[in-house]
Image (cartoon, helix red, strand yellow):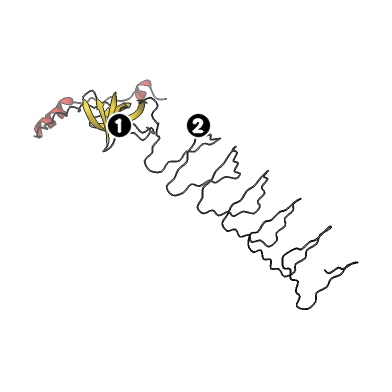
């Protein structure tokens, strides 16, 4: 067995004086430290209210220090007009109009966005007005939907040219009036059903058909100042009684 004295760790004494003598012998150049620059004061954005003085050649807002040029923030969709009271964010030389606080009573509120704009909702989107809704576009208006419903007490449309392409058309009217200078109807099959039908032609009416079949359950009358019945091969009159003259 080893004695307790053998288990004790050995302690080595360090002589710090020798290390100090070595550092003193080495001639090291002095290190000059430049003073650290003091941090520049940070400009904190501030909020100010002002009045719009002009919009023709750019947005000009009068703040506490006088009129300054400003830009409308992207989130501010309402376009300010002259005389409106607005809320501005001031950061250095930049001034942004954040919101239109109030304007002239009865003035039109205009929502204006630079570039394209898209309104989207994950659910239902409703657009309502107490008086009137107008949709205007310089080039095109498109409606795309799985199902389109239009309900109105009265409708008026003035269209220079119209084209309709569809698979099925079904219309129910109590009264329909069509006024046209010229009308053409083309169909592979045309079927018309009516209880009473009246047609008035001032000038010429002409029917050309491969087979023309005219039938009447009651009276079939053909009357005219001059009546001509002509057949290239056969003309036949058949009845229980045939009267001529």
Q: Which x, y percent locates residue 182?
A: 57, 58
- Most extreme residue toward the top, as rendered? 4
Q: What residue does disc 1 label?
A: 96
Identify the image quadrant of the C terminus: bottom right
Which residue is drawn at the image coordinates 29% and 26% (left, top)? Answer: 51
Which residue is drawn at the image coordinates 36% and 35% (left, top)? Answer: 74
Label count reads 2
Q: Which x, y percent locates residue 107?
A: 38, 29
For residue 38, side relative to residue 213 (left or right): left
Q: Name the element at disc 2.
A: loop
- Most extreme residue toward the right, as rendered? 240
Q: Which x, y percent locates residue 146?
A: 60, 45
Report which quarter residue 10 is drawn in: top left
Front position in the image: 29 or 4: 29
Q: CA distance from mark 2 to mark 1?
A: 34 Å
Q: What residue does disc 2 label?
A: 131
Callout 2 crowding tier (Cα within 10 Å): few <14, some 14–19, many ≥20:
few
Question: Is residue 46 in view from this perspective?
Answer: no
């Amino acid at each position: 067995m080893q004695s307790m004295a053998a288990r004790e760790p050995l302690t080595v004494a360090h002589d710090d004086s020798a290390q100090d003598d070595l550092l003193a012998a080495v001639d090291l150049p002095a290190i000059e430290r430049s003073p650290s620059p003091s941090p520049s004061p940070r400009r904190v954005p501030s909020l100010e209210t002002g009045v719009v003085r002009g919009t023709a050649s750019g947005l000009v807002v009068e703040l506490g220090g006088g009129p300054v040029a400003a830009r409308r923030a992207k989130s501010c969709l309402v376009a300010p007009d002259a005389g409106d009271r607005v809320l501005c964010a001031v950061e250095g030389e930049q001034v942004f109009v954040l919101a239109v606080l109030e304007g002239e009573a009865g003035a039109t509120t205009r929502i204006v966005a630079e570039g394209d704009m898209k309104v989207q909702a994950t659910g239902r989107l409703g657009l309502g007005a107490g008086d009137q809704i107008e949709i205007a576009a310089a080039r095109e208006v498109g409606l795309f939907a799985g199902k389109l419903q239009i309900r109105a007490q009265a409708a008026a449309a003035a269209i220079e040219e119209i084209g309709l392409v569809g698979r099925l058309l079904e219309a129910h009217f109590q009264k329909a009036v069509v006024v046209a200078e010229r009308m053409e109807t083309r169909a592979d099959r045309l079927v018309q059903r009516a209880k009473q039908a009246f047609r008035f032609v001032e000038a010429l009416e002409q029917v050309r058909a491969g087979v023309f079949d005219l039938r009447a359950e009651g009276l079939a009358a053909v009357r005219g100042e001059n009546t001509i019945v002509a057949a290239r091969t056969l003309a036949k009159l058949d009845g229980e009684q045939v009267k001529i003259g």
